[in-house]
Amino acid sequence: MLPDVVVIGGGIVGCSCAYYLAREGVRVCLVEKGNLASGTSRAGQSHIVLWEEPDINLQLEKASRLLYEALAEELPFDIEYRRTGSLALVENAGDWEPFERTVHSLQARGLDCQLLTSTDLCRLEPNLAPDLAGGAYFPEDAQVNPILTTLALAQAAKNMGAEIRPFTEVTGIELSAERKVTAVDTTTGRIPTAIVVNAAGVWSAAIGTMVGLEIPVIPRRGHIIVTEPVPDNLINCKIILAAGYMQTLGATSGVAMSANIQQTHSGNLLLGSSRDFGGFDRTVRPEVIRAQLARNLRFLPALANIHVIRTYAGLRPYSPDLVPIISEGDGVKGFYIATGHEGAGITMAPITGKLISEMITSKAPTVPLEPLSLRRFSHRQEEDRLG
Ligand SMILES: Cc1cc2nc3c(=O)[nH]c(=O)nc-3n(C[C@H](O)[C@H](O)[C@H](O)COP(=O)(O)OP(=O)(O)OC[C@H]3O[C@@H](n4cnc5c(N)ncnc54)[C@H](O)[C@@H]3O)c2cc1C
């Protein structure tokens, strides 16, 4: 049977698209050039974050977290979802005022978060450095295992009739004279279809080129350090990050770095995180690992007695305004785009899949689509050109 939709990419975003489309009764074929979760979705941490600017990201994150509550029940196996909350830490007194303003602005927009004094921090997390200026607790944040989530979404889609084809690389997309999608060419054969979803993460720009569209997504490397399992009471809140993390998002050169400590179900710590632009190079840079360890030790000195068991680097799909692209491809009928989630693709995968299924099945979108459109980049270029 021919598929209604071909989804390109077997990461967390593509598998979510396949899942929400299959739930609507759409015949889906998902193609992945390697194994499922072999791209960025195997390299992330585990944070379902609800406090990233701008406002459209907050909306996506809130909607996605609600979907995760349902997915934890619906999916065929455990995705290690838990409502952990997260703690943001302010290192120096001089950084307190801007942080307090940010928290007040998030509260004004309806986000549940509480400022904490340094005394509160010492009480809640006795192993943190005692000289921190304070912080905030975000009770709505949560945690999930991104690899298990990717696999569970794919399995659930398959259970509903989707075809999942790993080791199938897309080599071209065929268009009619009217620029309508007619087929997808792959290393395992041609697949006739009228609809394609480009969920190829950092490779989505190359897929865009196949239909003559410029998709401004580039790789942004991030390093992770994995420790041996540690006692459960080393950190009580399982996601603790420096408040300065948010500034690393906007950095455009060099290596931006922030402490980001997350404890997985198995007890290991994932210590993040860095950001730099180095093309598609996933080489681990020892000097970045050293600096990253130092940043994490600054906030959690007890790490000095814990062994590191491995390190790795992954590539975040960076879009220039840090907002994902969940959109139709302008001027190419039947071409949809779900990419550019940078450091929040695990968080936003469920709502992305849902929005793509709503677009394709002509349902009202859960979240406004205009700020997520590909068109916004050409409009900005046009505005810049006109001054
Ligand atoms: C260090 C680090 C920490 C992170 N921590 C978090 C976090 O705590 N919370 C959070 O929300 N997010 C986090 N992220 C971000 C998150 O991991 C990504 O945004 C998300 O995984 C992107 O998923 P994706 O499905 O778009 O991409 P991918 O997982 O890369 O999937 C795209 C897939 O497309 C396939 N593909 C490419 N080209 C083709 C082709 N021609 N034919 C067929 N298949 C193709 C690739 O093989 C790949 O598997 C982190 C990322 C990094 C690097």
Image (cartoon, rainbow, N blue to C red):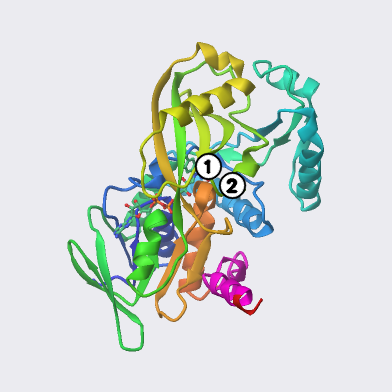
Is 379 a magenta residue? yes
Residue at which label 2 appears: 251
Residue 148 visible in the shown view: no
Q: Secondary structure at mark 2?
A: loop
Which quadrant would the N terminus be assigned to in this image?
A: bottom left
Q: Is residue 40 visible?
A: yes
The residue depicted at 44 percent of the width and 15 percent of the height is: 307
Query: Nearest the camera: 102 or 160?
Result: 102
Quarter where residue 158 is shown: bottom left
Labels 1 & 2 near each other (Cβ < 8 A): yes
Residue 10: image tag = none
Residue that extends furthest to the bottom in the rendered view of this protein: 177
Query: Is residue 256 toward the left or the right of residue 175 in the image?
Result: right
The magenta stretch spans residue 306: no
- Return the residue nearer the eye: 334 or 83: 334
- Residue at disc 1, CB closer than 8 Å to ligand 1: no
At 61% from the left edge and 55% from the top edge, which residue is drawn? Answer: 63
The disc labelled 1 sits on which kind of residue?
Gly
| In the image: residue 14, left or right of residue 51 | left
Magenta segment range? 364-384
**Residue 150 horizontal/vertical position (percent):** 40, 47
Residue 254: which numbered mark, if any? 1
Relative vertical location of residue 246 with respect to residue 290 in this rendering, above or below: below
